[in-house]
Image (cartoon, helix red, strand yellow):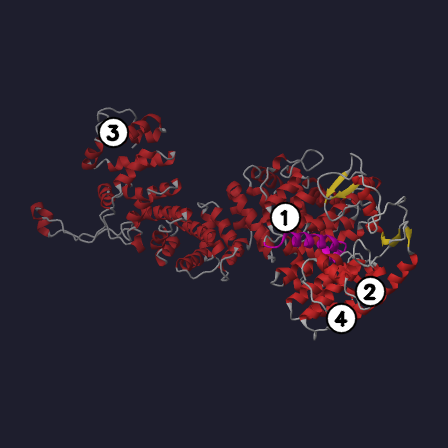
């Protein structure tokens, strides 16, 4: 063997290797075999007129140079002039050379075979692989010789070598062996060879990855191997990753991309690509289905899929153009759409991220909608499943709306008869419609019916309500979600409310609160919550008058499974019902709802609950429902007992500090206002002892007893727990702090609560002193000066007038021109009652003479 590969040479360029291999011979080489010009063995020897023999290509080149340079035509060996350029084939010599070359090649292939073992040295294996490359590149027919010599399996074995150089050279050699040779490719369909090659794709060394991709690209040109490559676990995933890699060699990326294009011929490969983020092949095939489903087979010759933005030269200017490098041919002869429908359905099963959903909607959305409108039920089902997937994101849903998805969806839902969808597909249609409606578009301007109806037209809403009452839970749930989406929008909720009122469906909708299916209950509760601001009393009457509904809502709230969306929606619904509906509040009191709510609020305050996503709306709803009990204190002793038992005043004071939860702070301040208003009725006034005999006759002997510990505002015995007095628990200071809140509603509620310290029936002067001690006078004046809302101005004028009854404060305020200006403005422009109060306030600071009376005394 050493003798055979004798004369070690530099393994530099491919041309150097070819030259060296061309000079390596087993049998002696005869001078007659060698061309005098090329100094190499001739392949096509020819003889000129003087009998000299040359390689045809070399002598033809010599003759051309003579003519081009204007020289005489001479023999390159003898330099004698020639009369003719005629070349005579030397057939005998050529046959002899071919026989000699065949024997020589066979001997060298045999030596290469003996070197292609894992036990050989690295240098011997490398030389053997390089010779095989040279041999195959010398002639296409030599690849058949390599095949028959069974060298390919031996080269494949070299992929197991521990030498990186050997593995890379083996991959390169296999690529050369299989190039444009289908027979050699077939060998790779057997065993685990393809799997072995795929493993090199994830190798850390870039050279091996590059060679493996190049080899796979050649193999992927075989249809049989396309399926084989795709069946190797992870092959397509790695190839897709390589096409998007920024660290790979650009040629490697191109080869990976072309390999994937070849693999697209098999449906399972297309599915895998889609699963791994390469969606274009799947979308392209769905487009093919769309063209067939549109019934334009007569135009198929005009439909061309090309690579790039320009049309195929063979197509007319009216061609339909599909841009895809996957299908560089017209699709007139492609398989019928039935073989592609499963891919459209598969699109509906993919887990797509939101950006991809938008891409898919823009690419095939209109095509899927067209398929959905076709008469083929199988095609409609596939399209509906795909649309269901891509409509679940707001941006992609808006694309589908622009493409006209609403009219066919509505038609599918309402159509009855021979062409109606089966119920399982109506459920899919309802799901798509629910997703589309949740996108928040202006649905009162989108035509969906033949008579220019919109989704919020009365007859369309009536049909939806009819379907809700006459279908199964799954479709009912989706249709309720449609109504939820329509009632989320301020521009459409009024129309839906009007239609529900005219249909009398509110009782039916309330009954879904008791449904055993959680999704159905949630959808109905969210719908009722959206309706409650517009038809709160009707809802309150329905909840209170229907057996079980209120109890079902309370049961949902009581579930101790963390905080769920359903619980947040249920308590939100109760919070939206009219807070002054005494009958509903009493029923909730009888059913123990408030005790439950106190417990849930306390647990949230202590951090003992899970479900952070819905904790804010849940807490806001709980506090809003709990405040209801404070509106019936004057008429319901049980309500007072409940507030005392659970120390609700202290709880609401604590909730004032829930920074960031504006609604909780606002509602808590409102509750404290209601509780404080009741304080003067609950305060225990002191019982004075009867005067003695002398004191009853001679007043000079009488002396008022001194009683300590009395409330300075309510003039009796007060406590936070029993009489809800705001002077306890630092409530005043915390309410004053809220006067600087950025939310006007919170400021309004806080100021209203503080104003209870200045109400008739309490010691107003002492109430002013309490506000002074709490540093509350300036914040109250600032509220008046800012005039943020009309409510705040009215309340601010009322409170300031009470404060200015104290002479010291009136004297100080009289020097502030801003306060005077604010009061004058109210005196001139506010409502009648506020103007009257502003007049009295101006009198306190001597801006209006006391003897003047602009307004009659209102008492």
Check disc 4 and report the residue beneath it. 4
As helix, strand or loop, the secondary structure at mark 2 comes to: loop
Q: Nearer the viewer, residue 112 or 518?
A: 112
Residue 29 numbered tag? 2
Q: Quadrant of the C terminus?
A: top left
The reply to whether the C-beta atoms of the residues labelled 4 and 3 are less than 8 Å apart is no
Q: Which residues are magenta?
A: 247-270
As helix, strand or loop, the secondary structure at mark 3 comes to: helix
| Residue 161 vertical placement versus 750 (above, below) | below
In the rendered structure, which disc, 1 or 2, sits on the residue that comes first in sequence? 2
Q: Nearer the viewer, mark 2 or mark 3?
A: 2
In the rendered structure, which disc, 2 or 3, sits on the residue that comes first in sequence? 2
Q: Quadrant of the N terminus?
A: bottom right
As helix, strand or loop, the secondary structure at mark 4 comes to: loop
Q: Nearer the viewer, residue 520 or 307?
A: 307
In the rendered structure, which disc, 1 or 3, sits on the residue that comes first in sequence? 1
- The alpha-carbon separation of the residues under discs 2 and 3 comes to 122 Å
The verdict on residue 82 being magenta is no
The reply to whether the C-beta atoms of the residues labelled 1 and 2 are less than 8 Å apart is no
In the rendered structure, which disc, 4 or 1, sits on the residue that comes first in sequence? 4
- The alpha-carbon separation of the residues under discs 2 and 4 comes to 15 Å
Check disc 3 and report the residue beneath it. 817
Check disc 1 and report the residue beneath it. 357
| Residue 711 vertical placement versus 228 (above, below) | above
């Amino acid at each position: 063997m050493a003798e055979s590969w004798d004369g070690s040479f530099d393994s530099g360029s491919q041309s150097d290797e070819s030259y060296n291999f061309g000079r390596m011979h087993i049998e002696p080489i005869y001078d007659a075999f060698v061309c005098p010009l090329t100094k190499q063995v001739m392949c096509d020897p020819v003889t000129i007129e003087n009998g000299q023999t040359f390689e045809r290509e070399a002598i033809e080149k010599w003759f051309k140079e003579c003519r081009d340079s204007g020289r005489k035509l001479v023999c390159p060996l003898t330099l004698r002039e020639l009369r003719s350029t005629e070349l005579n084939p030397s057939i005998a010599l050529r046959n002899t050379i071919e026989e000699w070359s065949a024997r020589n090649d066979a001997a060298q292939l045999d030596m290469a075979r003996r070197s292609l073992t894992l036990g050989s040295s690295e240098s011997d294996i490398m030389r053997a692989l390089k010779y095989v490359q040279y041999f195959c590149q010398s002639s296409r027919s030599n690849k058949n010789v390599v095949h028959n010599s069974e060298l390919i399996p031996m080269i494949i074995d070299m992929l197991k070598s521990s030498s990186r150089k050997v593995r890379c050279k083996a991959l390169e050699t296999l690529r050369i062996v299989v190039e444009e040779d289908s027979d050699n490719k077939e060998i790779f369909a057997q065993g685990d060879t393809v799997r072995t090659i795929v493993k090199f794709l994830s190798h850390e060394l870039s050279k091996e990855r590059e060679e493996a991709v190049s080899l796979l690209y050649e193999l992927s040109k075989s249809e049989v191997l396309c399926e084989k490559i795709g069946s190797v676990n992870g092959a397509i995933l790695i190839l897709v990753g390589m096409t998007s890699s920024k660290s790979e060699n650009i040629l490697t990326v191109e080869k990976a991309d072309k390999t994937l294009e070849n693999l697209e011929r098999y449906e399972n490969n297309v599915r895998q690509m889609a699963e791994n983020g390469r969606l274009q092949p799947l979308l392209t095939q769905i487009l093919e289905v769309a063209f067939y489903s549109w019934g334009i087979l007569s135009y198929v010759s005009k439909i061309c899929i090309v690579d790039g933005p320009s049309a195929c030269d063979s197509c007319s200017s009216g061609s339909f153009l599909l841009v895809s490098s996957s299908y560089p041919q017209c699709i007139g002869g492609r398989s019928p759409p039935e073989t592609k429908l499963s891919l459209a359905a598969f699109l509906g099963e993919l887990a797509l991220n939101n950006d991809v959903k938008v891409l898919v909607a823009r690419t095939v959305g209109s095509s899927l909608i067209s398929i959905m409108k076709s008469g083929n039920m199988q095609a409609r089902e596939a399209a509906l499943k795909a649309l269901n997937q891509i409509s679940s994101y707001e941006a992609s849903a808006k694309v589908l709306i622009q493409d006209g998805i609403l009219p066919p969806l509505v038609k599918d839902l309402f159509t009855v008869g021979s062409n109606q969808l089966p119920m399982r597909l109506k459920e899919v249609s309802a799901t798509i419609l629910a997703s589309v409606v949740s996108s928040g578009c202006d649905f009162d301007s989108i035509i969906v019916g033949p008579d220019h109806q919109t989704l919020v037209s009365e007859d369309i809403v009536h049909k939806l309500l009819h379907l809700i009452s006459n279908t199964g839970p799954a479709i009912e749930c989706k249709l309720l979600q449609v109504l939820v989406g329509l009632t989320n929008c301020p521009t459409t909720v009024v129309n839906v409310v009007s239609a529900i009122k005219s249909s009398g469906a509110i009782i039916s909708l309330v009954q879904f609160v008791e449904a055993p299916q959680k999704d159905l209950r949630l959808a109905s509760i969210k719908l009722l919550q959206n309706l409650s601001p517009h038809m709160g009393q009707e809802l309150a009457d329905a909840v209170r008058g229907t057996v079980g509904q209120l109890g079902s809502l309370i049961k949902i709230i009581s579930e101790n499974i963390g905080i769920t969306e359903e619980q947040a929606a249920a308590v939100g619904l109760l919070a939206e019902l009219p807070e002054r509906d005494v009958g509903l509040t009493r029923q909730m009191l009888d059913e123990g709802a408030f005790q439950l709510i106190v417990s849930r609020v306390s647990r949230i305050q202590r951090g003992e609950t899970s479900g952070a996503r819905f904790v804010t709306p849940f807490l806001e709803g709980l506090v809003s429902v709990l405040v209801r009990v404070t509106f019936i204190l004057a008429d319901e002793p049980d309500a007072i007992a409940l507030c005392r038992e659970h120390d609700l005043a202290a709880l609401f004071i604590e909730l004032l500090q829930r920074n960031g939860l504006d609604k909780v702070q606002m509602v808590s301040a409102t509750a404290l206002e209601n509780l404080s208003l009741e304080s003067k009725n609950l305060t225990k006034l002191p019982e004075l002892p009867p005067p003695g005999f002398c004191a009853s006759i001679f007043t000079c002997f009488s002396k008022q007893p001194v009683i300590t510990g009395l409330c300075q505002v309510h003039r009796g015995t007060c406590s936070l727990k029993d009489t809800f007095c705001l002077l306890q628990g630092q409530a005043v200071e915390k309410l004053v702090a809220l006067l600087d809140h950025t939310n006007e509603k919170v400021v309004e509620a806080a100021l209203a609560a503080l104003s209870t310290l200045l109400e008739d029936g309490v010691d107003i002067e002492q109430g002013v002193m309490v506000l002074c001690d709490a540093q509350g006078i300036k914040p109250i004046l600032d509220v008046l000066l800012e005039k943020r809302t009309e409510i705040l101005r009215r309340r601010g004028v009322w409170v300031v007038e009470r404060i200015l009854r104290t002479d010291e404060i009136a004297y100080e305020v009289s020097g502030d021109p801003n306060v005077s200006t604010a009061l004058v403005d109210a005196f001139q422009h506010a409502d009648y009652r506020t103007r009257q109060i502003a007049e009295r306030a101006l009198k306190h600071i001597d801006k209006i003479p006391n003897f003047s009376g602009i307004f009659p005394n209102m008492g």
